[in-house]
Image (cartoon, rainbow, N blue to C red):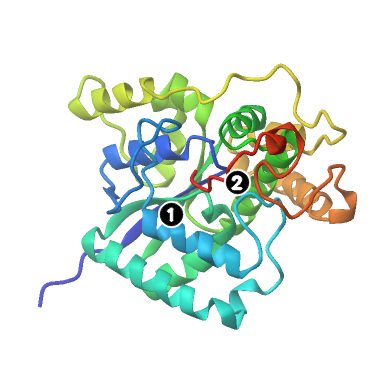
Amino acid sequence: MAERARRRALLVLGMHRSGTSCVARVVNLLGRGMAAHLRPPRDDNPTGFWEPRELSELNDRILSVLGTAWHEPLPLPEGWMQRPELEQPTRALRRLLAVELERSPDVVLKDPRLCLLFPLWRELLAELDCEVQSLLVVRDARAVAASLSRRDGLPDWQSELLWLQSVLSAELATRGEPRALVHYEELVRDWRSALADASQRLALPLPPDGTETARAIASFVSRRLDHAPMPDAPPGKDGSAWIAEAMRALARPGALEDAETRGQLDRLRASSWRRTSWPYPVARHGPGAGGAAGAAGFRCDARA
């Protein structure tokens, strides 16, 4: 009997509008398989989302069962993976992951919701005898907020807290796992330099200059549209320095493996996840539910 191919999934994690789509496609061009039934490109992401539609919809369903959604800057409840109401969607997710791995045993999978749901995916992939790697994508929180304001009408305070929740959740959940960090701004400026660390840590060999693969990556990255201009205002301008501190911590060389950085992020997590300490009017509502964007009647769009 032929030996089954080694199973490996590289999970791309990052806040919505952080460049996870671009990173997933670049990883695919570097040789990792891509999931089937991807979300089609749209005006707000013309080069493609590069995320499996059914898996993303199941992630939304799981968040809904837990009483939350991608746009709510609240941590998931304690013990959420043991909730009996998750049994059915969890089984469905496991079936879909099994299908993807059967089709492509060395696959890249991307969905911003993985920042919250990574522990569940890791458990299911382990049950499927699949090695898990993680590639965390970080983009300046101000650019993310500006992009979400333009696309979804979210106020800056909500987008900034979403960014903080996503980054801190993903960093904590992936500790002890094979992982690497890539900064979107550096990827667009110099993809080879941006991916140098990930190449070593995640066994992603970079192609020599002048090869067809190198030209394809350079062409794809150069066509990435900057979804929103970088605002002049500093992050945390409404009274919180959390965003700026997190961005500085993650900018350190080798940030994910640096004990000082992890301690700093742990302190930020403890502070920001105490709801009573939030300096923002956090409420359980969707995009456009309040403020000028809400008055304009903006629709909620859950796609990343």
Q: Which quadrant of the figure has residue 193?
A: top left
Tell me the distance, in whole angstroms, between the alpha carbons under discs 1 and 2.
15 Å
Element on which disc 1 rests: strand
Task: Mark 2: give few (<14), some (14-19) or many (20+) Cα within 10 Å.
Answer: few
Location of residue 203 with respect to 97 vertically, above or below: above
Q: Which quadrant of the figure has residue 239?
A: top right
Q: Nearer the viewer, residue 299 or 240?
A: 299
Verify CB contact (< 8 Å) between mark 1 and mark 2: no
Q: Answer with mark 1 or mark 2, whichever residue precedes in sequence.
A: 1
The answer to whether one can see residue 208 in this image is: no
- Which residue is painted at 78% across and 47% down in the image? 268
Q: Is residue 3 left or right of residue 202?
A: left
The numbered dot on residue 257 is: 2
Q: Nearer the viewer, residue 287 or 211?
A: 287
Q: List the residue tagged with mark 1.
A: 133
Q: Position of residue 227 (x, y in %)?
A: 51, 26
